[in-house]
Image: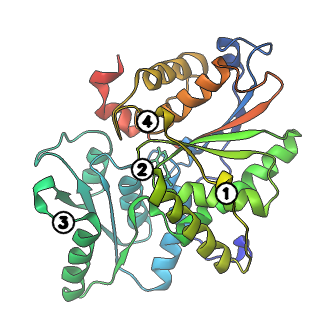
């Protein structure tokens, strides 16, 4: 069964634009020194401030509807973009949302994504370090409670990262392939911020299915490659199986460069902050301090250190995350 015949609940405004970043290229040395940079604007997917999760949720919500679900349950950090977009998707599908959000304090600042979760009136369950529960255990407990109240809960894993969620970027890869074909370009690499690996699974599977010219280059936003690579591989295999195909993966297919993480998840690096300012001041595009800023810092470093040639073309997939900007105000200036 091809990707086009998978059940899909429309949530995103597609296709997102693929834009040439001329001013950024100038700022990085011009055509003599810097490759051509195309920005795939998935920050503009349109669902409640946009971002990459809208693509995954189109397939996940379709599955939830198919199962007759009444509540979407998911999890993430207190400033999770995925949780915010899941809460928004639930509203559009006529469901409720319950969010398990990891927080270091009982009273996190109601700003950015958390503010939007509250406006969407999602049921927010803060998971504090002392709870002794994992995110998955907390979601299971909430699901049981909701079931006994007569609801039909649907659990979406953190980041929407499973085989169904991965269809989002299989479809996204097909969309991008069409745009690249129209422009007549064959990029060498696609840079993006990699977290829970569902985006990677979709992009890598999509690149294989549609014969992409580019290498899918994941820039890690948190440490811990090993077990997560196994997870990416499993997601790809399951998604391929659901599409009635098989793919052969080698270890070079699952790039997850940990060189730009810095101190950890959600802690912006100096290079990330520089990337945020540079994109704002050249292209008037806002990156975020948790994901897309770190991914762009890798691209910039690869340009400056000569790892990319000036006659290369690269794609930067802007995965969104804009609301987090407002929760990090004091770090940004
Ligand atoms: C979730 C997210 C990512 C990472 O996607 P994964 O599928 O979890 O790897 C990247 N950027 C932003 C802004 C995100 O919210």
Q: Is any atom of residue 171 visible in this view?
A: no
Measure how far apart labels 2 and 4 are at the Cα level: 10 Å
Circle 3 SS class: loop
Residue in front for this viewpoint, 3 or 130? 130
Badge 1 residue CB within 8 Å of ligand 1: no
In terms of sequence position, does the residue under pointer 2 or pointer 4 come before the other? 2
Q: Are marks 2 and 3 in contact (CB under 8 Å)?
A: no
Mark 1 vs mark 2, CA separation in Å: 19 Å
Front one among 106 and 297: 297
User: In this picture, is 223 found above or below 134?
Assistant: above
Of labels 1 and 4, the one closer to you: 4
Rendered image quadrant of residue 312: top right
Quadrant in the picture for residue 27:
top right
Q: Residue at x 65, y 19 (%)?
A: 305
Gap between marks 3 and 1, in whole Å?
33 Å
* Residue occupying image coordinates x 79% and y 16%: 31
Q: Find disc 3 in the rendering and name its residue.
A: 133
Q: Earlier in the sequence, mark 3 or mark 1?
A: 3
Looking at the rendering, in which quadrant would you find the C terminus?
top left
Quadrant containing the N terminus is: bottom right
Mark 2 close to ligand 1, CB under 8 Å = no
Q: Position of residue 253 (x, y in %)?
A: 67, 54
- For marks 1 and 2, give the one nearer the viewer: 2
Q: Is mark 3 within 8 Å of ligand 1?
A: no
Give the mark nearest the N terminus, 4 or 3.
3
Tell which tag, 2 or 4, sits nearer the viewer.
2
Q: Nearer the viewer, residue 212 or 286?
A: 212
Q: Please tell me the numbered disc located at residue 261.
A: 4
Judging by the rendered image, the residue that carries numbered circle 2 is 224
- Which residue is denoted by mark 1 in the rendering? 204
Foreground tag (2 vs 3): 2
């Amino acid at each position: 069964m091809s990707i086009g015949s998978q059940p899909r609940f429309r949530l995103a405004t597609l296709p997102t634009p693929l834009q040439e970043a001329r001013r950024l290229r100038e700022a990085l040395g011009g055509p003599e020194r810097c490759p051509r940079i195309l920005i795939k604007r998935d920050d503009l997917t349109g669902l409640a401030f946009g971002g990459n999760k809208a693509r995954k949720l189109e397939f996940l919500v379709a599955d939830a509807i198919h199962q007759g679900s009444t509540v979407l349950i998911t999890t993430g950090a207190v400033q999770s973009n995925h949780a915010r977009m899941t809460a928004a998707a639930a509203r559009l599908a006529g469901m409720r949302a319950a969010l398990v959000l990891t927080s270091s304090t009982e009273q996190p600042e109601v700003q950015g994504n958390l503010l939007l979760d509250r406006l969407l009136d999602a049921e927010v369950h803060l998971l504090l370090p002392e709870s002794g529960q994992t995110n998955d255990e907390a979601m299971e407990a909430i699901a049981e409670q909701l079931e006994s109240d007569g609801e039909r809960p649907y659990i979406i894993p953190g980041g929407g990262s499973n085989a169904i969620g991965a269809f989002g970027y299989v479809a996204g890869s097909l969309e991008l392939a069409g745009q690249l074909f129209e422009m007549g370009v064959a990029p060498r690499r696609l840079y993006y911020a990699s977290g829970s690996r569902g985006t990677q699974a979709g992009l890598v599977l999509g690149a294989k299915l549609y014969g992409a010219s580019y290498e899918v280059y994941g820039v890690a936003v948190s440490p811990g490659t090993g077990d997560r690579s196994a997870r990416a591989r499993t997601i790809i295999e399951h998604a391929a199986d659901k599409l009635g195909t098989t793919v052969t993966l080698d270890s070079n297919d699952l790039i997850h460069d940990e060189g730009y993480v810095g101190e950890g998840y959600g802690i912006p690096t100096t290079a990330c902050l520089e990337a945020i300012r540079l994109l704002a001041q050249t292209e008037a595009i806002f990156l975020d301090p948790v994901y897309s800023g770190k991914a762009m810092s890798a691209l910039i470093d690869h340009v400056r250190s000569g790892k990319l040639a000036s006659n290369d073309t690269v794609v930067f997939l802007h995965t969104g995350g804009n609301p987090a900007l407002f929760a990090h105000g004091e770090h940004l200036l």
